[in-house]
Amino acid sequence: MELIKRCLDYALSKLIIFLFSMLLICIIWQVLARWMGVNSTFTDEGARFIFIWVGLFGASLAHGQKRHLAIDLLTSRLSGRRKVWSDRLIHCLVIVFFLFR
């Protein structure tokens, strides 16, 4: 199970790097197009959508690696059974938020 998680984390991190690179290219092209006086609407919309996907994939990667700041702040002072139940509650709340967004 740990091997599958590491493979998924690796693939997700590479996807985030690729999307961020595409975001950077879109933004650079948009700046150059405006400087040259060319109207480039695709890069504007593309950058918005790519930015959203980078945020979503980045949040899922951070959550999977337990590096999400809000989750860490809630559980860092707990220990034992309270920490286990807190982790379970947080995972359930994340699932509920995902399902009813």
Image (cartoon, helix red, strand yellow):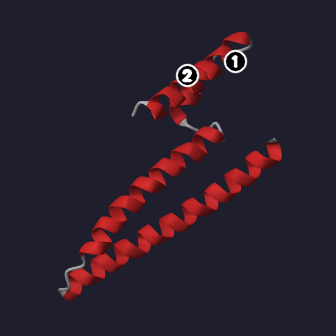
**Residue 90 placement, left or right of 99:** right
Image: 56 above or below 86: below
Compared to residue 12, the image places residue 64 above or below, namely above
User: Can you tell which quarter of the image residue 67 is in?
Assistant: top right
**Regarding mark 2 in the picture, which secondary structure is present there?**
helix
The residue at which mark 1 appears reads as 84
Residue 49: percent from left, percent from top: 37, 60
Q: Nearest the camera: 32 or 1?
A: 1
Q: Position of residue 91 (x, y in %)?
A: 59, 27
Residue at 60% x, 46% y is: 61
Q: Secondary structure at mark 1?
A: helix
Observer-nearest of 73 and 11? 11
Q: Amino acid at mark 2?
A: Leu
Which quadrant, please, contains the C terminus? Answer: top left
- Amino acid identity at mark 1: Val
Give left or right: position of 65 versus 70: right
Residue lying furthest top in this view?
81
Label drawn at residue 74: 2
Residue 8 sits above or below residue 90 on the image:
below
* The residue positioned farthest toward the front in the image shown: 99
- The quarter of the image holding the N terminus is top right
